Amino acid sequence: MTAPSQHHATAAPTERTLDSTTVISWKAPISFAVITVLLAVLFLTTRHGGDATFRLSTGSDLIQIPEITISGPVTTWTCIILLTAITVVSAAMVRAKRSVPLWLIVIFAVLGLVAFLTWAAAGARTPVIPLPGLLAGALSLSVPLIFGALCGVISERVGVINIAIEGQLLAGAFTSAVVASVIGQQWLGPIVGLAAAAVSGVLVAFVLAAFAIKYFVDQVIVGVVLNVLVIGLTSFLFSQVLAPNAALLNSPPRLQRIPIPLLSEIPLIGPMFFRQTLIVYAMYVIIALVYVGLFHTRWGLRLRSVGEHPQAADTVGINVARTRFWNVSLAGAIAGFGGAFFTLGAVGAFNKEMTAGAGFIALAAVIFGQWDPIKATLAALLFGFASNLQNTLSVIGSPVPSEFMLMLPYVVTILAVAGFVGKVRGPASAGKPYIKS
Amino acid sequence: MSDRNDPDVALETGSQVPPDEPVIEPEPEPEEPSRWQQALRQIATGNAIISVLAVLLALVVGAVMIAFTDERVQAASGYFFARPGDTFAAIWDSVAGAYSALFQGAVYNFRRPDFASGIRPLTETLNFATPLIAAGLGVGLAFKVGMFNIGGRGQMLLAASAAGWVAFSFDLPFPLHMIVAVIAGIIAGSLWAGIAGLLKARTGAHEVIVTIMLNYVALYLVSWMLRTPGLLQAPGSNNPKTPPMKDTAIFPDILGSGFNLHLGFLLSLGCVVLVWWILDRSSLGFQFRAVGLNPKAARVAGINVNRMYVYGMLIAGGLVGLAGVDQVLGTVTTGFSSGIDAGIGFDAITVALLGGSNPWGILAAGILFGAFKAGGFAMQAAEGVPIDIVLVVQSLIVLFIAAPPLVRAIFRLPQPGAKPKKRTRTTRKEEVAAK
């Protein structure tokens, strides 16, 4: 439902017509209207009369914020009225040929979320939503997704579709658990384990790169087969070697949380961002490095040019095959490093197929994030949040079927690639082997 | 069998095709130096030999893994320099033991007294092959239309749910009930895959992404239905599991009650013929292949490319759906849970790749992988080698077959023609053309 360009003042001279060409999109108002109607229908069909309580700080915080208790029906219907108002305003703005600003979308999203959470909590057995736990859990579910998404962004930007993110995460989880267990000290083990995880990610990437770049095998096929190969290898070694010798090979020391002084005492976001393990702090650095590297350095420019138009890049003297090979390997290192979070950062011991599809959600985040490291990170955070919201709601006994929350990332991605949400256009040459003639 | 020498069948099926097949018709060229030399060269550069060597190579890698992780081998290698013979004997024991258990579990059990119980493993192989062939045909047909159907898991889950629901909640006489259940399953799988085809045709959404995402949507949808009373959950139960299928809907055993082989195998064989007929003999199949080879040229030739994408996915989804139906009406008839797809949706991709996307190849590849599965369980039970080794061997086979120059380099075979790399590229495009 887009009106791509409105040419008005046809009688005016050509230059003026060009100047006044504006692109307007009805996507935002229509999405707003659909979401508002859906929420209203949801609240009408299943009414919850009770109150909802939002807990804003944990017991160990320096600064304690009192809990907020609000009435369910009043809050939800106030939110619905506000959402309707925003929808009308945005429609009016589009009619007036102005684009809907980002802050309005953010306000809409926050209001919608508050309405939904209040409604869900009011109908639950224990109508208390622990916000710090919800947010911190969301971040830790997002960590592997973010690493995977950054891996996907780099390798697709350089022109190699990477379906093997799942395999790279799993290889990282496996290797880090084994190496950290064998070394086994409080700090040395996990740190060497992290390095080993990155190396194992690179090894998987080497296979992908060799088959895709040297032998011109279809990249999607290599990725799919590599996932199966890594699942088979790690499961085989787990059953055959790790399980009988669990004490020696599969009991890695977990990484300790390092609270950052001062920052970790900020209410709400302090515990979420600054009471984390080394992997998460490394993640902040890597996100920044990938963003700056891709868009503000010579390395990034070359990388993107190879992914967009390899022939042109070759003409100006960039070695396409070498650029692709090493950047896919670098991406593998990032994914492998992130895979270590499953073992060293979270559970500890390795288990069969413990990544459970995280690599595919990461791929969804790459696409939903439009191949941009920051947006992909935000998409991964959103997916992690949806998944943890489901956990929280089932803990407090909310009547929302958890499966529909878990489905959200995938449905959103399908809508994104189908063009209903945002504009999706990947690197032009991703997936196409470059054959120098 | 005409497509064996078909130029667009590049990834020939390996083990089942005799390698000397293309050699029987030598060119009547009087000036050639030696017919034997030429024949040898053709064998060495042909595709069949690549398939055979790829299987061999993957089995060798599997053997190395089995040997290195075997405890007896590890113990013997502790004193390798004192008595090296022990290590080699232990390696031989572990590898030969594992592979003979694999063979006896997949083809013929020599320890049984009579032929009927000795041949039982082979029928188990065909039983495991049944859904693999059907789903492999679904993936392979989509390949021919230039699409990559990774959505086997979701299509199977939806098909299994639909067929299962019909099978346990309706009361109909025997053949009719089964037929209705099969049709319901095929339609469900077909429609679920059709979403991906429709989105590709209407909006250009990449089918790889859409089918991967639809897998998870289907998984959670089916999980929800399985734990919601009144939908799929068994009445009076709290487990996410369905009630057992009614006897009137279950596939009958085709070799008597002593064997598990059921009617689904015949349906899979029928599908092989059907897909061969569609692809090679029908005008729809011609349009499919034209779109798969070059969508732009097909559009210029007057073919409605978008419609072919939708039709292709509908048929592919129906075939994968039949695999889901096989699972609920043939293999697990006592009620199913959300793991009913048993990874077949992904195995089907390797089957289709190994079979070179042509129906007869997929039949052979499905039986080979069915043998790996049947034998893998026997190997796990007899020798304690985890069945996951089968995944490793299967994926290695596909990787090696996808890169003929690699296999040629390992075995030092001559590269065919002057430009082997270029040849690989064209092979890839013709065969898969997944964008």
Image (cartoon, grey):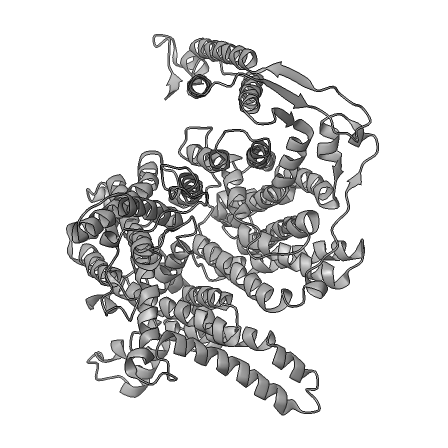
Name the quadrant of the C terminus of chain A. bottom left
Residue occupying the point 48% across, 59% down: A228
Identify the residue at the far front of this view.
Answer: B236
In the picture, measured across the screen, residue B69 lies left or right of residue B424, that is right
Residue A251 in the image: x percent, y percent?
71, 59
Asked if A132 appears above or below B141 in the picture, the reply is above
Work out whether residue B316 or residue B49 is closer to the camera in this orientation and state it: B316
Identify the residue at the far right of this view.
Answer: A261
Residue occupying the point 56% across, 36% down: A387
Residue A87 in the image: x percent, y percent?
47, 13
Residue A1 location, quadrant: top left
Residue A345 in the image: x percent, y percent?
69, 47
Q: What is the tally of numbered marks visible in this picture?
A: 0
Asked if A135 appears above or below A79 in the picture, the reply is below
Residue A245 location, quadrant: bottom right
Whether residue B409 is visible: no
Residue A126 location, quadrant: top right
In the picture, measured across the screen, residue A234 lies left or right of residue B147, that is right
Asked if A212 appears above or below A341 in the picture, the reply is below
Residue B426 in the image: x percent, y percent?
35, 59
Work out whether residue B429 or residue A88 is closer to the camera in this orientation and state it: A88
Work out whether residue B1 or residue B27 is closer to the camera in this orientation and state it: B1
Whether residue B321 is visible: yes
